[in-house]
Amino acid sequence: MRSHSVSNSTGETPFDESVVDTSAVQLEGAWRNFFAMRTTSPTDESAPTSPPIGESAIPDWREYLRGSGETRRQCGIRLACIDLERRWQLRQDWLVEQYFASEREWATDPEAITRLIHAEVAAKRARNLHCEVADYAARFPQLPIDQLHDAIESTDAPLIPNYRIEKRLGRGGMGDVYLAFESRLQRPVALKVLRAGINWQHAAQQRFRQEAIAAAKLHHPNIAPVFEADSHQGILYYTMEYCPAGSLMNRVANGGKLAPREATEWIVQACKGVAAAHAAGLIHRDLKPDNVLIGSDGAPKVADFGLVRQLQTDRPLTVEHSLLGSPGYLAPEQASGQAHQAGPPADVYGMGATLYRLVCGRAPFEGTDLLQVLRDVAAIDPIPPRRLAAEIPEELQTILLKALEKSPQARYPRIEAFADDLQRFLDNRPILARPIGPIGRTIKWTRRNPLAAFWLGVSVVTLLVATVVSLRFAWIANEQAALASERALREEQERIAAVTAKQAAEIAQLAEEKQRKAAEQAAESAQQAQIAEKLQRKAAEQARDRLRETLDATLNLDSLINLVKQPELTPEQQQFLGRMLTYYREVAGDQNNDPDVQLRIAEAGLKVGYLESLLGRYRESEIAFTDAISRLEALLPSAVDPTTYRVLLITGYRQRSLIRANQSPKLARLDQQAALGHIAPLGMQPQLSEAFAAVIVDLLTIVAEQHLLDREYDECQQRLRQIEQLIRQQSKTNPNSPNLIIYQAIANSLEGLLLSITKDFQSSQKKHLQAIALLEELSVTDPTDPPIRAALGDSLFQFALSLQQHNRHQEAIDRFSASIRIYQELLRENPLMVDYRYSLANNYIERVTSHLDRGDLQSLQNDLRQARTLVDELRKQSPNRLEYQRLSLRVDAEQWLLRPQVTENSTFMAIDRFWRDHIDPLLAPKASDADQRWQEARAAAQLAIRLREQGKYAQAIEQFTKALKALDESSEKGRNYERGCLYYERGLARADAKQHAAAILDFTDALKVQLPLVANESAEISYRLAVAWSFNDRGLAYEAQQEDELAEQDYREAIRRFQAIVQQSPNADHFRGLGASLCNLGNLLRLDKPAESLEWYTQAVNALTRVYRQNAEDATAAQFLRNAYWGRARAYQAVGNYPAAIEAWDAAISLDTDDEWLTFRQQKAYCLLKLGQADAAIAEISAVSRRPDFWNWHYVEFAWIFSLASQSDPKSAPIRIERGLQLIRMALERGYTNLPNLRNHPDFAPLRAHPQFEAILTQTKAKPTKANNSKK
């Protein structure tokens, strides 16, 4: 496998390029298959309607992501570039930013952004769309402007068949090098193209061809291979191996350097490639760190044979005496303009200079003056390496200085000799090169400075002669020398003074003349600048005026919005709409920096964003809002009156949050927070205009709804209070404003939902009714106004949800139906408004639950069909909108779960297959997409609850487990309340499945995450309720496991918590929970402590009676109250208080009409017998004994009553005994089998005394009667 390390020195994760290549090939193949399917799909309109090959079949690039670390990053960037270009081919205007949702780290990764920009620009230009650097600078301010220029301008590369250019890798003297993807062989390559500006130069073309031919001749592991060389439409190009690790220069960029031994190892390997070129008769002549690449296998590869010279011919490939190559690395013979004479020693010098750069951190010769650098190369020795880096060994310095000798004859004669000496150094063997001694240095200095050497020799000879003579004439010479020296010094001083004065005068005159000319030029320049400034100012003013006039006269976006809301658009109107949107984009690209113009463009952008959202084009809408927000944020700091700008920013952030909510909830919340940040400086100012106040109220409503969804009830309440305060202030000046009334109604509905969730149904109902009343009254004044009617429809919908939550399903159906009628009318009048279609579909889907509760399957199926039609229309318009995908999934799930074969004979395999086929493809987790895992957790939990309600406990447990796993892997893994709820719900499913030990573990896990949320009594009530119910249901599980002490502890703890809750919030649900826990504790104590249990039952009756009196239709409250009366009756029986027991049985009987009703009658009869009222007991039994829906044991219980009654009245005993035997026979015929109970129970003694008793038991056979078969 091909792999290389990004940085051996830093120990980063190895980057495996073959993984990237394989993934890219697979994705390209998937796209080819996709396009093939599109071209072969039927186009005949008369053909049967089948799903088109649309976005659902588009390959998902994230499915092809492989590897980890740097490999995964490079793989992702490559795949995203492919995906972006292919989507533009589909006419999907895909943008770079859309990849940041799943790969958030790319938003701060310059390489990822640059490559994606390159792909986007290339795709746009392929469709003849104009691209401006300024546009991308505004979108990506974090990138340097030169990097943006490079990314965009590199797309100007010529289109070469079979190659897709991804980015520019570099620019040489005559050509550009690009990273390209060769589609034919499915591999990345480096594509070198002769730059268009020099294509006409014959010599350049000749050199470019020679480079390709020379490199193609060479086949060696240390030479970058050439794959193809050709021309297209006169453009010369060739391809070679792509080396993603770059060159040796990349490893020592910005003055860096390598360890001496590491650098030497690289050069030794590179020398092998150069030696192979020499063996083929080619001299490179341009060796430097940039031209030694690091291949995919980690080996150095010599590249760029653009200056190659053939040893077999004297004909130069370059202009005679021209300078070719990089100055700092040129051999001295090349620096002197004799490049055609360069032989192998020139390449020895180049490799030596390259090694010098790697170990010293700089080239042998550097400078900004090119000519000076060339003179230094030819005449000056390089600085010894050890002076620049003391860690360089002496032996390596000796080798380098020999390779960098000025004379070719003094260097190593062949590149192999140079490499061999380096290898000796690496092997710790003696090197062949020798350091230069003092004599050698003197000779080198003499050769470089012959004139200075001559005069130095003369001086030495003269000095010797003078010494001899001086011995003879010392005293004369000394005397004369002193006199002469004094005279010479005096004369020299006089001469210098005269010259200095003259020069000073001349310099002063020149300076004065220069100053005068500079002043004249400055005055002339200032005058010209003033003229230019006036012209520029005038032109700018004219441009601003024209732009203002155009914006005011042509860009009437309000009329466009009204146009979109019409039932149908004519072709002319559609064309007009398209022209206006196109014109806005042109205006938005105007570079005019006038604040007034920018403000008008921003306002227009907000309207365009809203217009695009009405049309369902949410990506275009987000782009327009983003552009407007950027302009407004830039204008705000310098605004004189910031109120207008802040209100517009609130509008922009609010609208964009709605667009983003279904794709990235976190981004939507950030937008909401940004908008709230602009509200704070405004405050709740009474002087705010109604329009501005409406914008703020609208935002606060959205934020409150988000808090409600996130179960942040205190924050939701806080926002509602802010809304009320602002509406109250605005009402003082305009009490009858329709907008304020609408927002007041919306706030009431929202508060109604909040109260419903917190189990205060009475207050919730009041708020909902207030909202509906406000809107109905407002609709009387303007019955055709769409916003009023839509608000009324939404309020009815919200009220229906609250009613449904409290099991008042018929009332909920009525409200859903009223809302449906409103949205149907609105949709008929405004068929392009997707929000109406979405609201209508939601009504149908939610009404399904109430139909199901009432058993109205025909209405249920009809609602599902209506919802399916609406959802399909929504998804056809916006296939990628997650909001619509969820609706579609819910309709699928409801329809599938209601199929007869599923309802009657559902198995885990069937449920699992449905999940795999329908839900997993939609909600499958993507890499780094934790938001998606949160949605999967919610969907799994909803399905699990439905399965548990249908008695499919094993499947429900499986889905709850899946939901918990998804939650742990999601962006919302910190939601302990939701995690606790999932554990609790799974515990209920396990308890229903008689898995009580496992249920105890689940309830315990629920409490572990719930208890920290309720550390004090002021915690959120919903959290405290969850804890109370967890204790209650764990108590039930302990009781089922016969762990009565633990069960009693949990019941008492649940009661304590429920009592605290009802004191703070005394609503029906809270009292219902308290009553249930009181009953459960009474049941546990009834057998052993009947007197104490009686107290708990009495408290339960009191709590539940309060709930039942408030709503007699509350079936759950009725059932709980019946159970409380049942327990109290049995407790009274246990303590012998039969009159009180009879009273309790009567209460229980009045609340029940099912099978338990018969048992209650039998128990009441028993109490009457205990009071000596046998006739009354018989009458109680006789009143119900003819019912056809008895179970066989009911007959035995009634026989037991007749047996006991026979003992109280001897006269009636024979008749009652006969009736008892008859009932036993009927029980046996219906399958009763507990004969030992009949033979041994003392209460049946009167019946056993009858001579026919045993014969009845042994001879009566069970009969398959309807009643018997109906009950098991």
Image: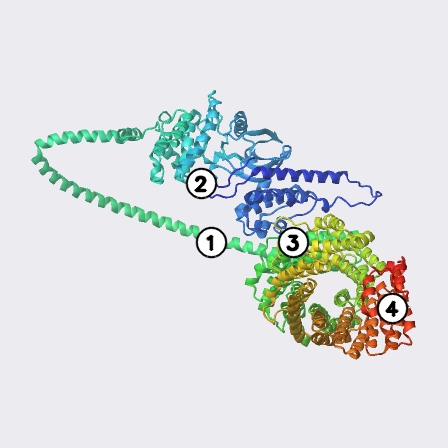
Report the residue marked by disc 4: 1249
* Position above or below: 782 against 880: below
Report the residue marked by disc 2: 252
Q: Amino acid at mark 1?
A: Ala
In the rendered image, residue 1138, in percent from the top left (x then y), is placed at 79, 78
Of the pair 550 and 1211, the residue shown nearer to us: 1211
Of label 2 and label 4, which has the lower sequence position?
Answer: 2
Give the quadrant of the N terminus.
Answer: top right
Q: Amino acid at mark 4?
A: Ala
* Position above or below: 210 against 782: above
Q: Disc 2 or disc 4, which is closer to the eye?
A: 4
Q: Disc 3 or disc 2, which is closer to the eye?
A: 3
Q: Amino acid at mark 2?
A: Val
Q: Residues within 10 Å of mark 3 (few under 14, many from 20)?
A: many
Label 3: which secondary element = helix
Compute the Cα span from label 2 to label 1: 48 Å
Of label 3 and label 2, which has the lower sequence position?
Answer: 2
Of label 1 and label 4, which has the lower sequence position?
Answer: 1
Q: Are marks 3 and 4 in contact (CB under 8 Å)?
A: no
Q: Are marks 2 and 1 in contact (CB under 8 Å)?
A: no
